[in-house]
Image (tube, helix red, strand yellow):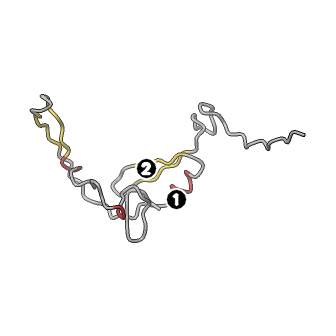
Amino acid sequence: MVQERPVAEQRPAAGNPVAGNPSGVPKASVTLADGRELIYYGDSADWAAGFPDRRPPGRVEASSQIRYDPLLGEWVIVASHRQDRTFLPPAGHCPLDPSSPGNLTEIPR
C-alpha cells in the first residue's frame, strides 16, 4: 500500500503578481537610526520589521576624497565617513547579530 504524502501549502511562484508585489515574496522595510532603509524578505518580514532601530542617531559628515593609488595606477575614491566601521570584531560584538539590550547593532530586534 502506498501512502500519499500531504500536499504542501501552495505558494505563488516567483514572478507571479501577488497584491501589488510582482515577485510574490513578502517584503517589509524599516528605517535605521541613520536614515538607511533595511528591507526584510520572506514569511517573517512583517514580524522582523516591527522592531525599531534603538541606536542613537549618529552625526555623519560625508566627505569623500579622490586619491591616486600608485599600486593600481588609477584614481580611487576614499569615503572618510566609513573609515570607523567595525573590522574583525570580537565574537561577542558581531555587527550582524540582532540587537540585544547590551549590544545595539545595525540589525534591530
Estimate the x, y position of residue 80 in percent, counting from the top left: 18, 48
Task: State the residue in front, 34 or 14.
Answer: 14
Quadrant in which residue 98 is drawn: bottom left
As drawn, the label of residue 39 is none
Q: Quadrant of the N terminus?
A: top right
Give the crowd class for mark 1: few <14, some 14-19, many >=20 residues within 10 Å: few
- Judging from the image, what secondary structure is the residue with disc 2 in? strand
Q: CA distance from mark 2 to mark 1?
A: 12 Å
Q: Where is 46 relative to 75, above or below?
A: below
* Residue ID at (35%, 63%): 93
Estimate the x, y position of residue 17 in percent, counting from the top left: 62, 33
Left or right: residue 87 compared with residue 67: right
The numbered mark, 2 or 1, whose residue comes first in the sequence reads 2
Q: Which residue is mark 1?
A: 50
Q: Where is 16 relative to 29, above or below?
A: above
Left or right: residue 75 compared with residue 3: left
Type of residue at label 2? Leu
Residue lying farthest to the right in this orientation: 1
The answer to whether the residues at label 2 and label 1 have Cβ atoms under 8 Å apart is: no
Type of residue at label 1? Gly
Left or right: residue 55 compared with residue 109: left
Estimate the x, y position of residue 74 in percent, counting from the top left: 14, 29
* Residue ID at (17%, 35%): 76
Q: Which residue is mark 2?
A: 38
Give the crowd class for mark 2: few <14, some 14-19, many >=20 residues within 10 Å: some
Residue lying farthest to the front in this orientation: 1
